[in-house]
Image (cartoon, rainbow, N blue to C red):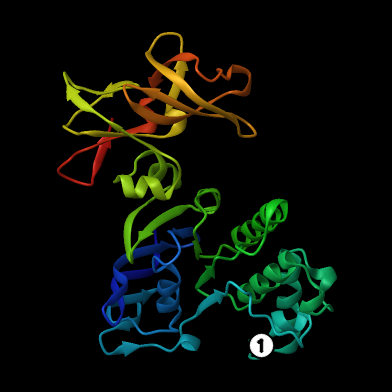
Amino acid sequence: MRPVLELRGVARRYGSIRAVNGVTLTLGAGRITCLLGPSGCGKSTLLRLIAGLEPADDGEIHLGGRVLSAPAVHVKAEARDIGLVFQDYALFPHLTVRENVAFGLQSLAPPERTARVEAELARVRLDHRATAHPRSLSGGERQRVALARALAREPSVLLLDEPFSGLDGPLKADVRDAALAALRAAGSTVLIVTHDAEEAMLMADDLALMHRGAIVQTGSPRDCYLKPVSLLAAGLLGDLNALPARVAGGMAVTAFGAVAADHDGDVVMARPEALMLVDEGAPALVVESRFAGDHMALILEAGGVRARARAPLDQAPAVNQTVQVALDPDGCRLFSPESPSSSPA
């Protein structure tokens, strides 16, 4: 992976609060990275440090080998060649869609500027709204105008801060898909901040999981979901069961079944889909069974332990029914009591 943007031990403090705490992160050329974490964990602050809107207190930021931030170095935002799409889109209400996208392209000759603007509007499928003003646009259209404006400048890196948080339901999915297609077509190197785990996994080539100002895991969406380095990291990507376990004879034994183990541990992290209903397995009582669209959401109890599971709609057991359960090792990790790291169960 050819690095475009590199952060090395970047930190930002506000008094005694460490909003960003020693972040090291690399963005690869033409790849979309999603920075995922709960509200208040430092994601937006990190974007502001990268964009140059705030100075870093420690660490270094490099763009294509150029130092943007380091001790005694702070390149101003307008000189960084980094685009930023704000959460509220920050469109100019008195300018048309075409004029908003053209803003910042004054250095181009008029014919080139016109061609660039028309190409970006076509890319985000808004060429038919070129003469409209922001007030007449839907939320999804405003988001796409902001994206087109940022892409028109052809920045080395594009930062998007919770770009779809103001959209709901089918509109959110449609706008996200259109934005993703535009970013892929442009070959942009992108960092997207989000607190939506499903959105992050759908969009990202690479994930960076953040908690309390620090990056706790990086990797592909699949690896971060199935191979979390800690229970904390696992929880950032969705529901999990922390099943008490004992290791004996190379197996991690829980109330819901056993999986192979190559080290000591006392907790098996199991995703709900890793609890499988089988013909022969560990007996468990169905405490709850709720319709969840494409599956039934179950609460099972075994040995005094409760766990979430899923069942196909046509195989849903009844409440108070006893079922047989086994663990899918691909959805499980065994965590050691000595360390937050993990190994495959």
Place of residue 193 in the rendered image (x, y in percent of width and height, measured from the top left):
49, 64
Q: Is residue 255 above or below residue 232?
A: above
Q: Quadrant of the C terminus?
A: top left
Q: Quadrant of the N terminus?
A: bottom left
- Of 319 and 266, nearer the camera is 319
Q: In terms of image quadrants, where is residue 234?
A: top left
Residue type at mark 1? Leu
Q: Which residue is drawn at the image coordinates 66% and 74% (left, top)?
A: 146
Identify the residue under disc 1: 108
Q: In terms of image quadrants, where is residue 57?
A: bottom left
Place of residue 228 in the rendered image (x, y in percent of width and height, measured from the top left):
34, 44
Place of residue 305 in the rendered image (x, y in percent of width and height, measured from the top left):
34, 28
Q: Is residue 283 above or below residue 91?
A: above
User: Does residue 265 appear to the left or right of 74 in the view shown?
Assistant: left
Q: Which residue is drawn at the image coordinates 77% and 88% (left, top)?
A: 94
Question: Quick one: label 1, few (<14), some, or many (20+) residues within 10 Å?
Answer: few
Q: Is residue 43 above or below residue 238?
A: below
- Of 61 and 209, nearer the camera is 209
Place of residue 138 in the rendered image (x, y in percent of width and height, measured from the top left):
77, 67
- Of 12 and 83, nearer the camera is 12
* Secondary structure found at label 1: loop
What is the number of callouts on the image?
1
User: Does residue 32 appear to the left or right of 337 in the view shown?
Assistant: right
